[in-house]
């Protein structure tokens, strides 16, 4: 959480100085987030779309939605999973997708905390459609399921 | 008077919103065209592309359908549909036979708008399963970039 | 949401308190109308400052060891953040098109923490005022997608080596401490084990007016059960309970005596 939120706590109060933490016991170092460049490039590209980018009057991608997608991806990030494809929607919405060897995960972010989610398992031929808000535990589980299935079948997936 | 404008006057309800319905003016054997922005295409292995299901999603505003261009009306008005659907951004477009859409319980109707007198709507594409069916039914209408779709 | 046995202190070391809600922007609102909003409370908050907007932030849950990653999204045109201060400089209302914050802060020893029971209704009034204002801009009621509560405490100490006296989660056994800091986060889940908010605790030593202090910062953010004012205030009230309990849990009885714990 940014200190900017606090009006004055440290930044603007000249009386306070010498905050030099020696250790950050629980803070992890900069993670190896291999989706970062592709995802950030894609989100920036989609946020820069003009109105009517689809020829039918579509709205530009909503910046707040794009920010929510960032937070959602951070919550589910898995180093072994490939970078998702991100498609724009016509109402400023976004859809994050993985299609791997018949398996499908689609996270349609209609607005922050309204994510229509679909999962398809090619083995059981079963599809699940649910709406998620801020808890993406089930998506993490699906990703693990896909990775395990792919490992069992000795199929490689690329980022 | 343009054929498209004549239809626009006959199909809007009192609230100037088109209710989902099957327009009798649109023949079963005619084609509806859906322009596909490049942003819907995911490059995949082997030089192919995968089309996102968002490409066939309905809008949450307006008439809440998937926007299309009605080829039949353009032909009647002597407009070249291939040129027409190439704007504003030229990429690819796909088409569906109206009969096939109605065959999977989708409704196809006219909704001419100021910017596009040949605008129509396909209603009922909200569910993922319907959009998957659409992906299977879609045929290229304009594909100058020789895109190969993985279905 | 009131917890009857919630610990209470006569002299809590609170330096600043921030209540924050994030809203969906009203469709027809534009920055040029901000003065109309200010007109409604200008007498109470006559000083204005303009700052860069805060970026939207969201608490999400998924993997256990969630990493703090920024993608570097470029910002499009955004509404500025307006800070409206009162004359005594102990209250601050901050507004941008997708956010409303209220800060109480102790800028000098005369400013005594007014208690959460007074602050929360004050924030409620501000939210209601904003809701009414935005009705003229196509938003019939506020759509609140996240709310937060933050307490920043300044614990005055004689010597950094006495930090053990205040915190029961640290145990330094040498008198050679120069600085220290710690931080952790905790996910708060409901009875069905569904997470709904995240607590962040940060502490670090430093100097204030040439005296050593430990800044202890506790904050919670999450989505309200429903997007309206009432539900958001209920969440913030619950966050208050969680923060007070956490503060009490990680600090020592000796420290509680210094802050004159009542309950």
Image (cartoon, coloured by chain):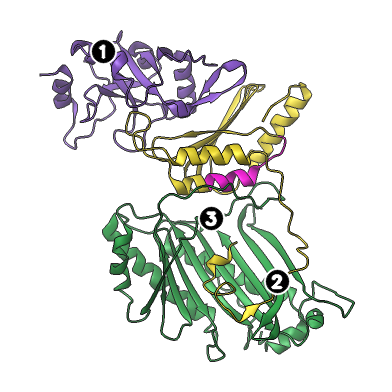
Residue C147 picture location, percent across and down: 51, 62
Is residue B94 located in the magenta-colored stretch of the structure? no
Helix, strand or loop under label 1: loop
Helix, strand or loop under label 3: loop
User: Mark 3 Cα within 10 Å, few/some/many (few <14, many 20+)?
Assistant: some
User: Mark 2 Cα within 10 Å, few/some/many (few <14, many 20+)?
Assistant: many
Instruction: Give the quarter of the figure containing the C terminus of chain A.
Output: top right
Q: Specify start and end residues of the magenta stretch as a single range.
A: A68-80
Instruction: Give the quarter of the figure containing the N terminus of chain A.
Output: bottom right
Looking at the image, residue C184 sits to the left or right of residue A14; the answer is: right
| Tag 1 and tag 2 share a subunit | no
Q: Residue A129 falls in which quadrant of the image?
A: top right
For the point 53% across and 66% down, the residue is: A5
Disc 1 and disc 3 in contact, CB within 8 angstroms: no
Q: Residue under circle 1?
A: B80
Q: Residue C182 falls in which quadrant of the image?
A: bottom right
The hue of chain C in the figure is green
Is residue A73 located in the magenta-colored stretch of the structure? yes
Image chain in yellow: A
- Distance, label 1 to label 3, CA atoms, is 48 Å
Image chain in purple: B
| Residue situated in front as seen by the camera: B111 or C262 | B111
Note whether C134 is above or below B99 in the view shown: below
Q: Residue under circle 2?
A: C203
Task: Note whether residue A137 is visible.
Answer: no
| Residue situated in front as seen by the camera: A40 or C100 | A40
């Amino acid at each position: 959480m940014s200190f900017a939120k606090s009006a004055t706590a440290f930044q603007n109060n000249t009386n306070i100085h010498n905050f030099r933490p020696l250790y950050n016991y629980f803070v992890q170092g900069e993670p190896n987030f291999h989706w970062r460049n592709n995802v950030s490039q894609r989100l920036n590209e989609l946020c820069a779309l003009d109105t009517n980018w689809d020829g039918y009057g579509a709205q530009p991608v909503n910046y707040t939605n794009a920010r929510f997608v960032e937070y959602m991806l951070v919550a589910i990030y898995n180093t072994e999973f490939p970078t998702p494809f991100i498609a724009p929607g016509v109402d400023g919405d976004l859809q994050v997708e993985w299609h791997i060897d018949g398996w499908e995960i689609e996270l349609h972010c209609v607005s922050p905390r309204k994510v229509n989610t679909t999962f398809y398992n090619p083995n059981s031929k079963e599809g699940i459609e649910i709406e998620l808000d801020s808890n993406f535990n089930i998506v993490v589980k699906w990703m693990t399921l896909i990775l395990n299935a792919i490992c069992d079948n000795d199929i490689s997936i690329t980022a | 008077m343009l054929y498209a404008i004549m239809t626009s006057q006959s199909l809007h309800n009192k609230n100037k919103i088109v209710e989902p319905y099957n327009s009798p003016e649109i023949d079963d054997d005619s084609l509806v065209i859906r322009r596909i922005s490049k942003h819907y295409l995911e490059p995949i292995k082997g030089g192919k592309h995968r089309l996102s299901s968002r490409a066939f999603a309905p809008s949450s505003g307006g008439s809440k359908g998937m926007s299309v261009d009605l080829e039949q009306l353009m032909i009647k008005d002597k407009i070249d549909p291939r040129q027409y659907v190439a704007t504003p951004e030229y990429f690819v477009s796909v088409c569906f036979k109206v009969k096939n859409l109605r065959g999977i319980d989708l409704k196809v109707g006219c909704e001419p708008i100021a910017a596009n007198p040949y605008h129509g709507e396909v209603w009922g594409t909200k569910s993922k399963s319907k959009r998957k069916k659409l992906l299977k039914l879609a045929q290229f209408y304009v594909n100058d970039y020789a895109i190969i779709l993985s279905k | 949401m009131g917890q009857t046995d919630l610990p209470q202190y006569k002299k809590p070391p609170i330096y600043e308190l921030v209540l924050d809600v994030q809203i969906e922007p009203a469709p027809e609102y534009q920055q040029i109308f901000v003065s109309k909003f200010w007109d409604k409370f200008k007498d109470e908050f006559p000083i204005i400052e303009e700052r860069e907007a805060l970026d939207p932030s969201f608490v999400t849950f998924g993997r256990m060891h969630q990493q703090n990653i920024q993608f570097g999204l470029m910002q499009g045109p955004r509404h500025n953040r307006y800070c409206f201060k009162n004359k005594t400089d102990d209250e601050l209302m901050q507004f941008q098109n997708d956010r409303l914050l209220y800060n109480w802060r102790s800028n000098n020893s005369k400013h005594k923490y007014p208690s959460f029971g007074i602050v929360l209704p004050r924030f409620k009034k501000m939210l209601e005022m904003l809701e009414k204002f935005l009705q003229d801009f196509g938003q019939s009621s506020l759509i609140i997608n996240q709310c937060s509560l933050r307490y920043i405490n300044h614990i005055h100490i004689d010597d950094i080596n006495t930090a053990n006296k205040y915190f029961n989660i640290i145990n330094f056994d040498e008198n050679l401490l120069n600085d220290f800091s710690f931080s952790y986060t905790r996910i708060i889940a409901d009875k069905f084990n569904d997470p709904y908010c995240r607590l962040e605790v940060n502490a670090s030593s430093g100097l204030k007016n040439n005296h050593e202090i430990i800044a202890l910062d506790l904050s919670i953010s999450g989505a309200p059960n429903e997007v309206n004012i009432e539900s958001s205030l209920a969440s913030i009230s619950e966050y208050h309970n969680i923060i007070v309990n956490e503060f009490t849990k990680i600090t020592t009885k000796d420290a509680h005596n210094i802050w004159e714990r009542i309950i």
